[in-house]
Image (spheres, coloured by chain):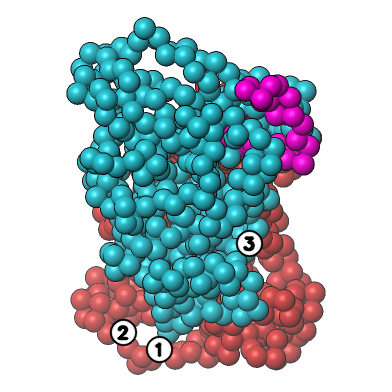
Chain colours: A red, B cyan
């Protein structure tokens, strides 16, 4: 018996076009320690959009294909083509995580048959997915696919921030784009764990949202006195690590500079090398694709700016820590890590121009879930 | 008995002036584990100029004082004043390292009496210096003050780069401003220790200098094909760590990008997160004071850009490693770590306008030594 279904794919080609299609994929019987899962829910995370749409100019959207098998085409601006040279010509499956029901199990995986599981491993925007047993997690009894669809990316990233901060000796954290789903989870974790968190947002609405879940330090980067408030909040909390979703421009630099200014307040003697307080900025997102500007002359010499990504983090901390974090996600599935979706769409609807433009905007408070069984 | 002598001091004040003076300093008898050293030689390192002249505009030099006790005044441009707020109004002594003869020794330090020693600890541009015994190193028999004046800053920094690279698992190194005294020492160490080194310089003259001491990878950043050559050299050597003296602009970013391109050549499968090769850029100097620009979208996510400074490095590695590195400097004092000075000047001459302009230029191949006994 084989399992045949649709699979969403993104292909950038040499002529400067990016094409989204629904291909047919046929899966053979699962091998040893493998299962086949019928996908019932897969969220659209910001990190999925990078692969789905990557460098495409959304305003150039052109439609094609049929109602059942729609196809969308976009132009890739000349200046962004260098960054995607490595994927040109490759048809790439999309969707980092999801949940569904095991419909076939290979030798050694029989106990999973019929179970509802959360899944990690890419290619989730599909009707069926073949996975190794280690990449699925049985959901608690009674949990829906929707509840288990986003076990990994946001929850483990938020927990990963706290784990990283702790293991490197930081006692308080700064977070940008703090009203995101991830940011809300981080605030809840920090409240539970007693870790001061300085949230940076870009609107009053976002500020209200975070205060509503108990945040005490929320700064709006559009306020005229933002920088002064930032130094005060950092001095008050003692934050020496920041996680930045924006990446481009100078906000990250402003945060490190504010940390140095806060540290300088405690210095009694001048040093041309700055404070001895070590300041760490992690860039984990790219909401702003422009280069990062570091005004490092205001940092002293004790600083570091680094990329942060979930997969290498999990590899670095090892299986035991990864399992502990994963268990916490299951334990707090309907509280800290509950995901709320504003719209559920079928696989074909993911390629509907209006719907695509809507989820591509990444508006605060909006969250899309792909439900392949919906069509 | 007390020791009285001149001491060079730099003072930035609230009115936007920076003033260099020769003050009189009187030292009481040394206490327990303390010595008084007659300073006989102190190099002018690039790292000294930051404290000596810091934010001053050299073209605004104005003279004053007397022949014996000259005084120089400079304007501090408005936009640079923020960076020196912490030192305003403080009269700061200058000179990181030097050598001289112990002329007085406190209880517990008697064996050092009359010995010639190398010294670390600042305030070396002076006739006399009081130090704790742990901050002086007796020189090998027959070594001159000139030979022992620069035991610390350049040698320990060059050794520190190699130590840092090794301890973090890197097997080859990239270095900018590579024809500097420090760069030449680093090349000699790397040749001795069998570590591939990619040298980046800015002229043919500098390229020739490095090739003359055995360098095999020397790239001129002004060459039209510099970036392509950089990727090749990094691919060939496997360098994943760089030490950058320049800091400003995008050269550091170009190096990280080249490391990622070299790593991508070995990848068989596309990942939108880039290679899994960890790339580290350390910024240890500020030849370019402008902000650092990171084109991080071309780095993948496995990267880090950090400040590097000798003192925290030595604190981090601990006394045993620091002692081992220090011993290597003494063992190779007249070979790997030999310093050659192009001009020896008295303390008062350090404030001679023509001489100051000359050492402030930091020209390749030129190196100044302050010899207080010369006047």
- Residue B250: mark in rendering: 3
Q: Residues within 10 Å of mark 1 (few under 14, many from 20)?
A: some
| CB-based contact (under 8 Å), mark 1 and mark 2 | yes
Q: Is disc 3 on the same chain as disc 1?
A: no
Q: Is residue B313 left or right of residue B261?
A: left
State the SS at label 1: strand
Q: Residue at x 59, y 82 (%)?
A: A85
Q: Is disc 2 on the same chain as disc 1?
A: yes
In this rendering, is residue A149 above or below A71? above
Q: Find the distance from the CA under tag 1 to the CA under tag 2.
A: 8 Å
State the SS at label 3: loop
Q: Position of residue A367 (x, y in %)?
A: 63, 58
Q: Which residue is mark 2?
A: A30
| CB-based contact (under 8 Å), mark 2 and mark 3 | no
Instruction: Report if residue A109 lies within the magenta region.
Output: no
Q: Position of residue B102 (x, y in %)?
A: 31, 24
Image quarter of the N terminus of chain B: top left
- In this rendering, which labeled residue sits more in front, label 2 or label 3? 3
State the SS at label 2: loop
Q: Residue at x 68, y 50 (%)?
A: B290
Instruction: Report if residue B58 lies within the magenta region.
Output: yes
Q: Is residue A344 left or right of residue B200?
A: right
> What segment is highlighted magenta in the picture?
B50-73
Q: Which residue is mark 1?
A: A27
In this orientation, which residue lies closer to the viewer: A363 or B251? B251
- Residue A36: mark in rendering: none
Q: Find the distance from the CA under tag 2 to the CA under tag 3.
A: 50 Å
């Amino acid at each position: 018996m084989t399992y045949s279904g649709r699979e969403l794919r993104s292909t950038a080609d040499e002529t400067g076009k990016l094409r989204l299609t629904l291909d047919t994929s046929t899966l053979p019987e699962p091998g040893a320690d493998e299962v086949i899962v019928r996908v019932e829910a897969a969220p659209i995370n910001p990190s999925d959009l990078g692969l789905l749409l990557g460098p495409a100019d959304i305003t150039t959207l052109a439609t094609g294909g049929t109602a059942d098998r729609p196809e969308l085409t976009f132009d890739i601006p000349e200046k962004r083509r260098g960054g995607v040279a490595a994927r040109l010509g490759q048809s790439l499956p999309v969707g980092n995580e999801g949940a569904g029901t095991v419909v076939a199990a290979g030798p050694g995986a029989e106990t999973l048959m019929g179970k509802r599981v959360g899944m990690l491993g890419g290619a989730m925007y599909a009707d069926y997915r073949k996975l190794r047993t280690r990449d699925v997690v049985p959901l608690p009894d009674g949990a829906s696919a929707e509840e288990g669809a986003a076990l990994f990316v946001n929850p483990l990233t938020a927990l990963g921030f706290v784990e990283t901060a702790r293991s490197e000796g930081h006692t308080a954290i700064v977070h940008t784009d703090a009203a995101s789903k991830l940011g809300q989870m981080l605030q809840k974790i920090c409240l539970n764990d007693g870790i001061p968190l300085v949230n940076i947002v870009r609107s009053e609405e976002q500020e209200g949202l975070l205060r509503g879940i108990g945040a005490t330090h929320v700064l709006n980067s559009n306020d005229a006195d933002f920088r002064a408030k930032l130094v005060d909040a950092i001095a008050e909390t003692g934050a020496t690590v920041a996680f930045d979703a924006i990446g481009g421009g100078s906000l990250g630099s402003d945060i490190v500079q504010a940390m140095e200014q806060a540290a300088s307040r405690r210095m009694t003697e001048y040093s041309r090398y700055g404070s001895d307080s070590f300041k760490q900025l992690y860039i984990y997102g790219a909401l702003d694709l422009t280069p990062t500007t570091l005004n490092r002359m205001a940092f002293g010499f004790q600083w570091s700016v680094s990329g942060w990504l979930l997969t290498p983090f999990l590899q670095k901390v090892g299986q035991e820590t990864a399992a502990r974090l994963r268990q916490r996600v299951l334990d707090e599935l309907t509280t800290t890590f509950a995901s709320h979706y504003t719209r559920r769409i079928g696989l074909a609807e993911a390629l509907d121009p209006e719907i695509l433009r809507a989820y591509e905007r990444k508006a605060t408070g909006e969250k899309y879930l792909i439900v392949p069984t919906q069509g």
